[in-house]
Image (tube, rainbow, N blue to C red):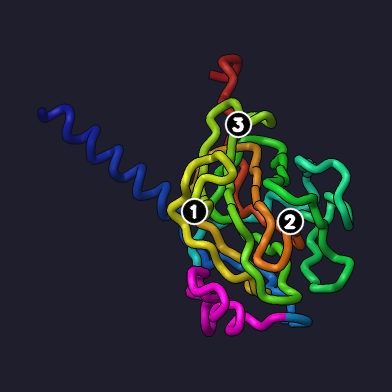
Amino acid sequence: MVRVFPVLVFAICIASWTFAEEGGVPLKTEIPEEILAGTPPDVLAMLFPNLEKPPKGERPDFMVPKGTVNLALKKKVTASDPEPVLGEITYVNDGNKEATETNFVELSPKTQWVQIDLGQPSHIYAIYVWHFFREARGYHDVIVRVADDAKFTKNPRTIYNNDQDNSSRLGIGRDRPYIETNLGKLINAKGAKARYVRLYSKGNTANSLNHYVEVEVFGKPSPSPVSNRYR
């Protein structure tokens, strides 16, 4: 026991030092200007009382480790609908969140997804998504999954799911459907390690189509394993 105790103390000190080195800072992102050309959020809330209402006032700080950045910006993006109804797939993560009539991609009806390749395994702390906010609406079966491979066969995990009836065949979700606004939806990814991020939806309260203005994936690249050559 005398020998174990110093080792335990050393391990605790290392863990504490690592935590202090990582630190915690508020997540920062640019919130686009609110432009409502249709149904306002309070009216939609009355029409669909099951929808989670938008946050009022400033959103509380969401803390992330120092050095966290938007890993998704202009990375390779693909979709289940290779020929969008409107827009381009690259709009998903081009960094432009303006609520113009042309600054979104529109995908076909039924369950559709967009997928972002982060380029390497990364620790993901938060995901921001803006589907469409020129009018208040809620999107059905919003599901966010991560995996180690593009086909989602290696270590797939679900980090958000508001599918209430398993209509998208990925399980019944515990999250509540919400009203879209310019504030976007902030999803806690809890440091999940993955390379690929896939976001699903299945139409919305206004029509059967699927839309994305912007997706941001905040995290830090995972350190590459040290080769035996250098050990």
| Secondary-structure class at tag 1 | loop
Q: What residue sits 47% from the left and 57% below the top?
A: 175
Q: Mark 2 is on which residue type? A: Asn
Residue pointed to by mark 3: 148
CB of mark 2 within 8 Å of CB of mark 1? no
Q: Mark 1 is on which residue type? A: Gln
Give the CA separation, mark 2 to mark 1: 18 Å
| Secondary-structure class at tag 3 | loop
Q: Residue 127 carries which label?
A: none
Give whichever of discs 2 and 1 has the lower sequence position.
1
Give whichever of discs 1 and 3 has the lower sequence position.
3
Residue pointed to by mark 2: 210
Residue pointed to by mark 1: 164
* Left or right: 137 in relation to 11: right
| Viewer can see residue 208 | yes
Horizontal and vertical percent position of residue 172? 47, 46
Give whichever of discs 2 and 3 has the lower sequence position.
3
Horizontal and vertical percent position of residue 65? 51, 56
Say which quarter of the image contains residue 140: bottom right
Q: Magenta segment range?
A: 39-60
Q: Mark 3 is on which residue type? A: Asp
CB of mark 1 within 8 Å of CB of mark 3? no
- Residue 51 sits inside the magenta stretch: yes
